[in-house]
Image (cartoon, rainbow, N blue to C red):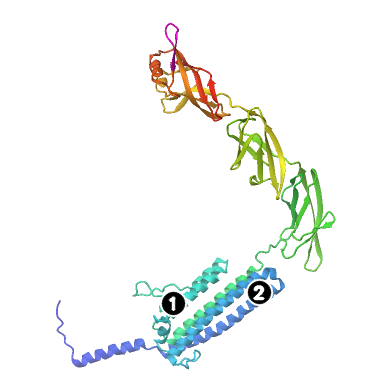
Amino acid sequence: MGSNNTRLSPRQKMINLMYIVLTAMLALNVSSDVLDGFTQVESGLTRSNENVEQRNAALLNALRSFNETNPDKGQAWLDKAVEVREATDYLYQLVDSFKHEIVVNADGADGDVDNIRSRDDLEAAAVVMLSPSKRNGEKLRKAVDNYRNLMMSMIPDSIRRNNIDQVLSTDEVEQKGLIGGRTWEESRFDNQPVVAAITLLTKLQNDIRYTEGEVLTSLLENVDAGDVRVNKLNAFVIPQSRIVMRGGKYSANIVLAAVDTTQRPVININGSQLGNDMGLYEVMAGKTGTFDYSGYLEVPRGDGTMMRHDFKSSYTVIEPSATVSATMMNVLYAGIYNPVSISVPGVPTNSVSAVMTNGTLTRNGDQWVARPAKVGEEAVISVVADFDGRKQEVSTTKFRVRKLPDPTPYVNFTDLKGNTDRYKGGRPFAKTLLTTSPGIGAAIDDDLLNINFKVLSFETVFFDSMGNAIPEVSDGANFSQRQKDQFRRLSRGKRFYISRVKAIGPDGITRDLSPLEVIVN
C-alpha cells in the first residue's frame, strides 16, 4: 500500500474533530417543530379516542336495549359484547399506565401526560419499556396479541378479521442495515423522544377502540342473522313415518316455515288445540287402516291480528311384520352354522332381537347365525322389536331341520397354469395331472351349500388284463405309494375306481360316499 505524504497541521486536525462532534450533536437534536407536530397529533388522537368510545358505548347500549325486549335472542350477543368491552378497557388502561410511567421517568414524580416538559428525552421510553428487568414492552406486545386473537374470534366476516389483524399487528419490523429485523417494541420505544413514544401509545389506544367498534358492530348485525325473511308462509306436517304398526305410535311435527322460535303458533287439530308448544302431534295407533286429520295454525301479525294457515295430512297403520329368510335355501341344516337375515321394516337393527327353539341363534354384526340341534324337529325363530322403549313380538317363523347331504368326492390337482382344481369323474383325466395329485377331498359345492368335509380313508380299485380287481388302500386322504405306482402303469383309455370313501363333516357325522370313476387320458 502506498503511503500518504500529505500531513495535516494541528489546527486543521482540530477543525475536523469539531466538525465531527457538531454533526453528531445535530443528529441527536430533535427540532422543536417536529416535537410540536407530535404534540398536535397526540391531541388529535386523544379527541378521536373520545369520539370512538362514545360510538362504541352507543353500540353496547343498543345491544342492551335489544336484550331487554327479546332476551332469548339478545342475551348471548350481549354477553359477548360485555366480554369485548372488559377486554378493551383492560388493555386501554394498561397502555395508559405505561404512558404515565414514561412521562414520570422523564419529568419526575409530578409528570403530566397532557403537559410533557422533557418532550425530547430519548431515554425515558426505552428505560420504561425495554428494560430487561421490567420487560414492559414484551408484556404489552403479548397483551395486544391476546386481545387481537380474542377480537378476531368474535367476527365471522373475513374482511373485518383481516383489518383487525393488520391494525393490531405485532410482527417484527424490517430495517435497513439490520439482519432479522427489530421486535415490535424496539421499533416503537428504542431511541424515541418521549412525545413520540406517547403519541405511538395513543395511536395504539385508537386502534384498540377501532377494533372494539368493529366487533360490537358485527355482534349487533348478527343478532338477526339467523332470521329468515320470506314473502310466503306455508304450514307443513312432518311425520316421522306415514306407516305405523298396530301398537306403535304415530308422531308428526306441524310447523310454520321460517317462523321465529320465540313466537310459537297456536295449533288446532280436528277441532282441539294441540297440547304442547313444540308442534308435536302424537296419537296411539289402535287399529289398522288409513287415517286423515286436518287443522290450522295461527300466528300473530305485527298489528296484533292473527294469521291463519290450514293443513291436512294422513297416516297408515299396518299389522306388525318381520322378514326372516335363510340365506342357504329355505331349510336349516343341523350341526352347522346357517346364516340368517332378520329385519323389521322401520326399526333399526340394534332394536331387533330374536330367539330360536331346537338350537342356538346368535347375532354376528347385522346378520344372525342359526345352529339347529336335532334333525326332523322344527326350529322356530321368534322376532321381537323395540318400539320407543316398548318391546313387541312381531313375527314367528318355522324352519325344517335337515341333515347335511352327502358330499361329492374329487381328486385334487393343479393344472398347467398353476391353478388348483377338482376332478369329479365323467371325463378323461390327464395321467400327468393324476400322478402329481396328492390325494382326494370331498365337499358340497353346488353354489347353494359350500361346505368342505374331511376325508378319512378310501380305496382304489384297478383291473388287470384278466379282469381281476386289484384294491389298494390310501394313506388317509392322500394317495399311498402303491396307488401311485399303479397310476404309472396305466395306459391311455384305462380306468379305475375310487371307492369306500369315508369322510366326516362339520356336523360330526362320518359318511360313506359314492365311488368315483377315473378315466385316464
Q: In this view, does 328 lie above or below 286?
A: above
**Residue 479 appears in the rendering:** yes
Amino acid carrying label 1: it is Glu
Of helix, strand and loop, which one carries label 2? helix
For the N terminus, give its image quadrant.
Answer: bottom left
Residue topped by disc 2: 63
Horizontally, is 300 left or right of 140 in the view?
Answer: right
Residue 505 rendering spot, x and y as whole percentages: 54, 28
Q: Is residue 465 magenta?
A: yes
**Residue 345 appears in the rendering:** no
| Mark closest to the chain's N terminus, 1 or 2 | 2
Identify the residue at horizontal 42%, vertical 13% (top origin).
Answer: 492
Q: Tag on residue 499? A: none
Q: Spatial distance from mark 1 to mark 2, Cα to Cα? A: 35 Å
Identify the residue at horizontal 42%, vertical 84% (top origin).
Answer: 128
Residue stretch in magenta: 463-472
Horizontally, is 308 left or right of 390 in the view?
Answer: right
Q: In this view, does 307 lie above or below 31?
A: above
Q: Dot 2, how many residues are within 10 Å of its Cα: few (below 14), some (14-19), or many (20+)?
A: many
For the C terminus, give its image quadrant.
Answer: top left
Q: Are marks 1 and 2 in contact (CB under 8 Å)?
A: no
Q: Dot 1, how many residues are within 10 Å of its Cα: few (below 14), some (14-19), or many (20+)?
A: some
Q: Tag on residue 138? A: 1
Residue 14 rendering spot, x and y as whole percentages: 23, 92
Of helix, strand and loop, which one carries label 1? helix
Q: In this view, does 384 lie above or below 99?
A: above
Q: Does the magenta stretch include residue 397?
A: no
